[in-house]
Image (cartoon, grey):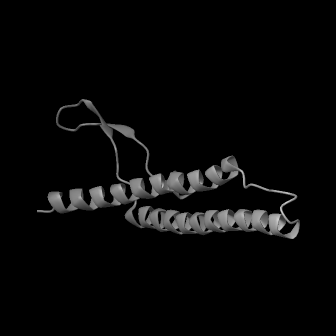
Amino acid sequence: MLLSTFPGWHEETDGRTGSEIVIKPFPSRPVSKVIAWSLAVAWLFALVSALWQHVAASSAAFVLATTTQDHLVARPGIAAMALGWVYVVLLVAPFIMMVIIILSISLLDKLTDD
């Protein structure tokens, strides 16, 4: 929802030349920082969740095998584990992109200050 507050591109007429130019305004810095912090917290929660899922599945398989004296053997599914960890890895990408946006806007701001 916070990304919907980012400004969109629009066209304006240049006062000196009379030609139309495309204006690409920068997103709000406070909103960008809130989004970056939210993504960081979401990534931490996803990391803890995937770790607990991994530990719980392995523990359940071990307990099942131990209590049935190896008559029943359960193996945690590779696909289920992969889905949990892929989500953690994919959640890092938007966080890194938001940090890059924040750093590039601050660098541009420092370069254009006179």
Q: Residue at the top extreme?
A: 19
Which of 65/30 is in front?
65
Q: Residue at x 88, y 65 (%)?
A: 68
Indicate whether 16 appears above or below 96. above
Q: Residue at x 18, y 32 (%)?
A: 17
- List x then y, in percent, for residue 28: 40, 60
Left of 2 or right of it: where is 11? left
Numbered label tally: 0
Q: Quadrant of the C terminus?
A: bottom left
Left of 53 or right of it: where is 40? left
Q: Residue at x 72, y 51 (%)?
A: 77
Indicate whether 52 appears above or below 75. below
Q: Quadrant of the N terminus?
A: bottom right
- List x then y, in percent, for residue 52: 66, 68
- List x then y, in percent, for residue 92: 48, 56
- List x then y, in percent, for residue 103: 30, 60
Which of 21/44 is in front?
44
Left of 78 or right of it: where is 68? right
Which of 27/66 is in front?
66
Left of 24 or right of it: where is 16? left
Q: Residue at x 63, y 62 (%)?
A: 50
